Amino acid sequence: MSKRFFITGTDTEVGKTWTTVLLMQYWRKQGFSVAGMKPVAAGCQWLDEQWKNEDALLIQQHNSQQWPYEWVNPYAFELAVSPHLAGQGVAVESDLIKTRLNEMQQQADVVVVEGAGGWLSPISSQMSNAELAIELSLPVILVVAIRLGCINQALLSFQSIQALSGACVGWIAVNYDAKMQYSESNIDYIKQHISAPLLGVIPHLKHPQLMEDDFPFSQLLVS
């Protein structure tokens, strides 16, 4: 049976997609077949007669197989605002997302599902990222952008994940701000106050790229 993970973050624009892609690259390098999806995305362009999201396209590009775009991103909304506003009038159905997830799972060793925004952010007027992860029974990986305010965001997000799902398998630090002072000290503090393991530290990157010499992720995620 394949491993499945839900990637969430302490906020929007914290590096979830880059982390998702780097994880996918890492697992593929380890010899695993990988499927990634971003079920709900807001901020799309009209391409090939459908709305497509830049982040979802990047995830699709790094899949082991070229699944159709609508499998990777079942709900794509034009406006670059919160999905519950961008998708007004559209019912985001967890059953459809679950169907796509299960189809991918049958053909991949690892399936990664990236949420939209932070853990408690809404993906529709009826559902949050947290509720989707719980509905799909996915263990959670928390992405923390290391910048001013990250300690409070990280601890609150982790507490909520534990309270609602009890399934945070680890967290990943992203050096989001290249000029951040005492970034290592902030990471150490979070590490001491979060019971889930630190799975890796991603340096400040202009583009997600495979790191041949010192890849930042723990090998404990898939074994």
Image (cartoon, rainbow, N blue to C red):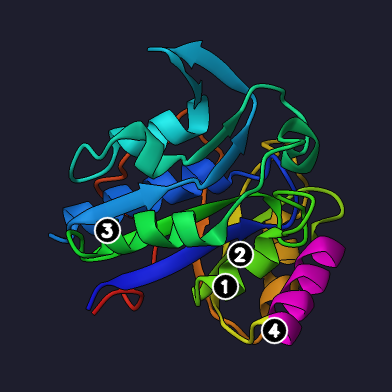
Residue positioned 64% across, 82% down in the render: 165
- Circles 3 and 2: CB distance less than 8 Å? no
- Tell me the mark number nearer the camera, choosing from 4 and 3: 3
Residue 54 sits above or below residue 62 on the image: above
Query: Along the line of sight, which residue is nearer the eye, 163 or 174?
Result: 163
Nearer the N terminus, badge 3 or badge 1? 3
Q: Judge the density around disc 1: few (<14), some (14-19), many (≥20) Cα neighbours within 10 Å.
A: few
For the residues marked 1 and 4, what is the alpha-carbon distance in whole angstroms? 15 Å
For the residues marked 3 and 2, what is the alpha-carbon distance in whole angstroms? 17 Å
Mark sitting on residue 135: 1
Nearer the N terminus, badge 3 or badge 2? 3
The residue beneath circle 4 is: 162
- Tell me the mark number nearer the camera, choosing from 1 and 4: 1
Q: Judge the density around disc 3: few (<14), some (14-19), many (≥20) Cα neighbours within 10 Å.
A: few
- Tell me the mark number nearer the camera, choosing from 2 and 4: 2
The residue beneath circle 2 is: 132
Task: Name the amino acid, label 4.
Answer: Gln
Residue 24 sits above or below residue 3 on the image: above
Nearer the N terminus, badge 2 or badge 4? 2
The residue beneath circle 3 is: 103
- Circles 2 and 1: CB distance less than 8 Å? yes
